[in-house]
Amino acid sequence: MLINLLAVLVLVVLVGSQTPPVWPNQFEITFDETTKEITTSKTKGVIYYDWTGQRELITREDGRGDRYCNTVEKFTSTPCNHFVVGGSLLD
């Protein structure tokens, strides 16, 4: 019992002493995405993030599996972009 209590105390001290990760103000990252709705869709994309300019762009090679893109071009393979500036989605 004492050993378990000491292990928990050590864990709490270690976790509490760690600093959280800091994201860079600007970055881009590629991703592979698989969605399963009626059918399975796979695509690749890029997220461009700019905290300084308060904007974000998400691009997908094929928006068929995206919940927003697929509402415009239902079940159609077409590129799709989401552009957000200052918290507002732009078309």
Image: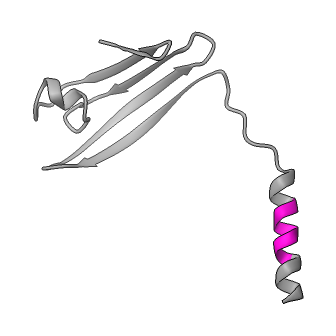
Q: Residue at x 42, y 28 (%)?
A: 46
**Residue 11 is one of the magenta-drawn residues:** yes
The residue positioned 83% from the left and 54% from the top of the image is 16
The kind of secondary structure the magenta stretch mainly shows is helix
On the rendered image, what quadrant is the C terminus found in?
top left
Colouring scheme applied when the structure was drawn: one colour
Q: Position of residue 76 (x, y in %)?
A: 11, 31
Decide which of 67, 77 is in the foreground and name it: 67
- Residue 39 pos. (x, y %): 14, 50
Residue at point 50%, 12% (across, down): 86
Q: Nearer the viewer, residue 3 or 46?
A: 3
Compared to residue 2, the image places residue 40 above or below, namely above
Is 90 in front, or is 50?
Answer: 90
The relative height of residue 25 versus residue 86 in the rendered view (above or below) is below
Q: Position of residue 21 (x, y in %)?
A: 72, 40
Question: Start and end of the magenta stretch?
Answer: 7-13
The relative height of residue 9 versus residue 17 in the rendered view (above or below) is below
Quadrant containing the N terminus is: bottom right
